[in-house]
């Protein structure tokens, strides 16, 4: 599946594909992951814009990875969170 990285702003969000579920990472300028989330097919752009509207997660770019299913995205998200422990994800 594909990956894509864009600036963490409205213009960048509009460049992201919406045709598959994704895992997304909001990253700092130094490439540190601040937040990891998932978005279902058709909700990728909308989900990233929600983070922009809230303004509580700083980031310079957003990176997405497309997956075959939302279940695959959920598994990948948990794996990334446990490995990287992003500052803005609630730790379990």
Image (cartoon, helix red, strand yellow):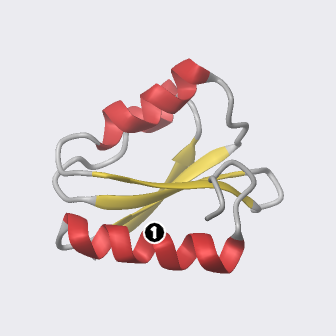
Task: Pick the quarter of the image with the N terminus.
Answer: bottom left
- Residue 35 appears at what percent x and percent y? 62, 52
Q: Is residue 54 above or below residue 22?
A: above
**Residue that lies at the very extreme toward the right in this rendered image:** 30
Residue 2 seen by the camera:
no
Considering depth in this image, is 65 or 78 the residue closer to the camera?
78
Residue that appears at 48% across and 72% down: 78
**Residue that lies at the very extreme toward the top in this rendered image:** 53
Tally the marks.
1
Q: Is residue 52 above or below residue 80?
A: above
- Residue 3 appears at what percent x and percent y? 40, 67
Q: Is residue 24 left or right of residue 31?
A: left
**Residue that lies at the very extreme toward the front in this rendered image:** 92
Residue 75 seen by the camera:
yes
- The residue singled out by tag 1 in the image is 77
Residue that appears at 44% across and 28% down: 49
Q: Secondary structure at mark 1?
A: helix
- Residue 59 appears at what percent x and percent y? 70, 42
Around disc 1, counting alpha carbons within 10 Å, would you say few (fewer than 14), some (14 to 19), or many (20 or more)?
Answer: some
Residue that appears at 35% across and 46% down: 16
Q: Is residue 57 left or right of residue 19?
A: right
Considering depth in this image, is 23 or 85 the residue closer to the camera?
85
- Residue 32 appears at what percent x and percent y? 76, 62
Residue that appears at 63% across and 47% down: 61
Task: Pick the quarter of the image with the C terminus.
Answer: bottom right
Q: Is residue 58 left or right of residue 51?
A: right
């Amino acid at each position: 599946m594909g990956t894509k990285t864009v600036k963490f702003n409205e213009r960048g969000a509009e460049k992201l594909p919406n045709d598959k579920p994704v895992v997304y990472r909001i990253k700092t300028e130094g490439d540190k992951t601040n937040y990891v989330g998932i978005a279902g097919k058709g909700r990728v752009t909308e989900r990233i814009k929600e983070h922009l509207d809230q303004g509580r997660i700083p980031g310079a770019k957003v990176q997405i990875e497309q997956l075959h299913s939302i279940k695959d995205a959920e598994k990948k998200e948990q794996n990334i969170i446990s490995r990287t422990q992003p500052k803005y994800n609630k730790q379990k």
